[in-house]
Amino acid sequence: MHGSKFSNPVNSRTLSDLLSYLDVVQAFLDKAVLDRDFDAADRINAEFSVCLSALLEAAMVPDVTELARFRQIKARHAEAQDALAKILRETRGRRSKVQAALSAYSRV
């Protein structure tokens, strides 16, 4: 984000620019989910929040197309968050099973 692959969204002049930036950030989050990269997902979520704040600060009224685009990006973001939570639950479940097996093995 800042100083990396993206330009600063706060300096964007149009709502369309901000939405484009948000879409790019979301694409990186989608990749982090596929890669199961929680560190990257955490950094990307922080950047997503910065962009949402910039959208709130922009005193622009979205047109119907921009509003639909924003809703689509937000839906993708919610899906990515759900996928990350599911991966985390599955990982914790597997870890618990491994710990139980190790514990049982150590008693033998």
Image: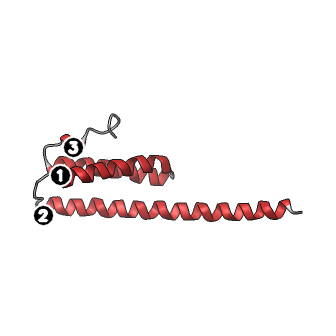
For label 1, the residue is 57
> Is 8 placed left or right of 62 in the picture?
right
User: Is label 2 in a helix, a strand or a loop?
Assistant: helix
Q: Residue at x 46, y 62 (%)?
A: 83
> Where residue 106 appears, x then y in whole percent?
84, 59
- The residue at which mark 3 appears reads as 10
Look at mark 2 in the image and give the residue it sits on.
Answer: 64
Find numbered disc 3 in the image and state the secondary structure of the residue it sits on. helix
Left or right, 30 with respect to 17, comes to: right
Q: Earlier in the sequence, mark 2 or mark 3?
A: 3
Category of crowding for the residue at label 3, using alpha-carbon neighbours closer than 10 angstroms: few (below 14), some (14–19), many (at least 20): some
Q: Nearer the viewer, mark 2 or mark 1?
A: 1
Q: Residue at x 12, y 63 (%)?
A: 64
Q: Amino acid type of disc 2? A: Val
Q: Which residue occupies 51% across, 53% down?
A: 36
Label 2 and label 3: CA atoms lie apart by 22 Å
Mark 3 in CB contact with mark 1 (< 8 angstroms)? yes
10 Å neighbourhood of mark 2: few (<14), some, or many (≥20)? few
Q: Is residue 58 above or below residue 70?
A: above
| Distance between the alpha carbons at the discs numbered 3 and 1 | 9 Å
Query: Could you tell which of marks 3 and 1 lies nearer the N-terminus?
Result: 3
